[in-house]
Image: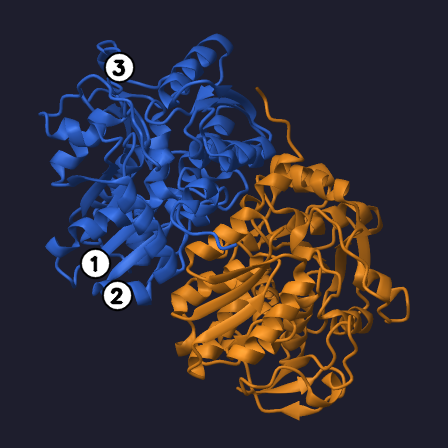
Chain colours: A blue, B orange
Amino acid sequence: MRYWYRCSECGKEFEMTPELMLCPDCSAQQQPDEPLRGVLEVDFEGVLPEDFEPIDFLPVEKAYFPAIPVGNTPLWEPERLRNTLNFPNLYLKDDAANPTGSLKDRASYLVAAFARKHQIQDIVLASTGNAGSSMAGVGAAAGLNVTLFLPKTAPPAKMVQALQYGANLIRVDGNYDLAYDLSMEYSKEHGGLSRNTAHSPLTIEGKKTVALEIYQQLGKRCPDYVFVSVGDGVILGGLYKGFRDLVNVGLLDKVPVVYAVQAEGSSAIYRALHNDGRFGPPIGSTTIADSISVDVPRNGYYACKQIREHNGQCITVSDDAIIQAQKQLSTAAGLFAEPAAATSFAGFLQVKADLPPDATIVLLLTGNGLKDIASAMKGVKIPE
Amino acid sequence: MRYWYRCSECGKEFEMTPELMLCPDCSAQQQPDEPLRGVLEVDFEGVLPEDFEPIDFLPVEKAYFPAIPVGNTPLWEPERLRNTLNFPNLYLKDDAANPTGSLKDRASYLVAAFARKHQIQDIVLASTGNAGSSMAGVGAAAGLNVTLFLPKTAPPAKMVQALQYGANLIRVDGNYDLAYDLSMEYSKEHGGLSRNTAHSPLTIEGKKTVALEIYQQLGKRCPDYVFVSVGDGVILGGLYKGFRDLVNVGLLDKVPVVYAVQAEGSSAIYRALHNDGRFGPPIGSTTIADSISVDVPRNGYYACKQIREHNGQCITVSDDAIIQAQKQLSTAAGLFAEPAAATSFAGFLQVKADLPPDATIVLLLTGNGLKDIASAMKGVKIPE
């Protein structure tokens, strides 16, 4: 298999080098406070065997991946939840079973392999928490130095996790967007490979394995609907990329209908879709779902394009609905998801009346509830 | 396959009924403040196919198990840790990848199946935290009511987890031993199936699947050494039971050498082994490894018997060694384990000079680091 980068806006092609992050032409038109311009996609040419391993469909040779079991997360068939909701073909894809407890490990895994291939020792990133603790953990397994910019408001568990893995942590007195800017300045000055989400094309590409696994776990089928929570739009991008690659390689004939679910208090992509794809000035985000709380969604243009081209849907849910969805998922299925993860379930609950009951539906659950105990406390009453 | 109970002390056999917990004869000799007398084991007769699924080797029919993906946790091959320590055949069995984040799910899974088979709706237990949140989660998937007695000192994450899953939580102003006594009184008065560890024979039996998986993941081989942290001795009992069952069914010719690792501040089994198997008056336990902090190890007699009969070793490690082991596991392998889990690694580090470097060694890691952030903070420095 041969791989290269292609600009998701102008279509120009580039060799995959560690220096290249965005399309030089399109990113030159970058305006302040808007999503990234010139996000690169990995394109490919070649034949994929029908019984492929997801890792064989990533653009770095297997030998470079670190020894940490990322992916192969379970696809649950939640009997009680199916019965309660009357959706007999509902599935839960539980990415909390990844080594650091979130889907972000899929991106970190590919970034780590790419760094090893190119003998790069230092990784730099900003994060709301999960991407940071993920890169720290996967980086530890790979023997890489990870420098992480984290907002001071990140849940303590995510910060402690990153420190345990040995990351060089810089706590930022501000939001994710400020942490992002500082991390970019840092890597400009000190070098190191950026793993900033969307900025590094490998973050989208790495996350595509979740779609490949869903396809395989369903017995080489495409689900009818997938629900995914959306902050900056990179998991959404990776999900589409996986299904599209399966179509391009001839193993699928369609991509599923994706429901992109945003928190009402952090809904920039939803607003842009209702504004002809234009992103207005950023609005300060406030939601309990910290992992999807962003003012400027870095992958916003790319995400909007994917949703439009593939007849996706974008909806918003309230924080109350997220807290209730988190509780219902725990009590009816035994799956304790963090608020940002339960957001996909909240979206499903909101629109389920519009869906055919016999449809094959996958809820993507992106992070472990143990990562944010303070939020989970809002959904329960502690007895004396 | 046919299954029945056999008393681990007198050898008497019994039918597997929900009412029976301990051997009536041996438990009649129970003294206050000593480990349980008359712990029952599951015995069997029949043929196991070579390519069996672990669930097929449990004494409840598959159809009764709830829809929650327990077990099949990854066996890591930690490249960097192997190189650093110079043990090229070192493996990490990461049971934090279970749905509720600990090995306890294996026992809860079998207890839930047994309850469903016998149409029992209520489960009662005491716990230091993991068994309780586990039974709550697996019980939620199974549609069972779970009443849980938890010491107030249990890490908040474990309590919140149990509440999220919808357990009826009773917080006990005292230690695990008091919680245990209260739970026994409660079930005597209100009924319900006890899932108290060692008291329910299914807790030992359910945990044996971890040994079956290790055997399969190593390519149908027995490791030379397994390191396991030990509090009440039930995980140890389950581990031995799995390997012994593989010997009894003719798939293995030996059980591994098991290193039972206790915290210095909670070492009742270690002390008994050095006192001709006699348990003295309980000593108040104090250790950072909350999951293995018990004054009276309920499965103490059984655990001592297993260690002696199979040439096992029992050692103790300090809390400092546990904190350091937890940190090293995170930084060198990318595996963030809770203190009680990292205790097995601390034990390995203590005795590794005595082990042949080419031995196949499995460290059993029983719970997720995210379950106890306060303890993990002791191993890291939080930057300003």
Foreground pick, A10 / A145: A145
Of badges 2 and 1, the one in the foreground is 2
Query: In which image quadrant can residue B249 be found?
Result: bottom right
Q: Are marks 1 and 3 on the same chain?
A: yes
Of badges 2 and 3, the one in the foreground is 2
Q: Is residue B290 visible?
A: yes
SS at mark 3 in the image: loop
Query: In which image quadrant can residue A126 be found?
Result: top left
Q: Residue at x 45, y 40 (%)?
A: A374
Give the labeled residue for mark 2.
Answer: A84
Above or below, B290 against B189 in this view is above
Q: Which chain does the numbered disc 2 sit on?
A: A
Above or below, A59 against A282 in this view is below
At label 2, the amino acid type is: Thr
Disc 1 packing (10 Å; few <14; some 14–19; many ≥20): some
Q: Is residue B205 visible?
A: no
The answer for how far apart the CA atoms under marks 2 and 3 are is 44 Å
Q: Which chain does the numbered disc 1 sit on?
A: A
Residue A360's label in the rendered image is 1
Of badges 1 and 3, the one in the foreground is 3
Foreground pick, A144 / B28: B28
The answer for how far apart the CA atoms under marks 2 and 1 are is 16 Å
Q: Residue at x 66, y 83 (%)?
A: B22
Give the labeled residue for mark 3.
Answer: A33
Q: Give the residue at the far right of this rendering.
A: B275
Q: Residue at x 37, y 30 (%)?
A: A202
Foreground pick, A300 / B217: A300
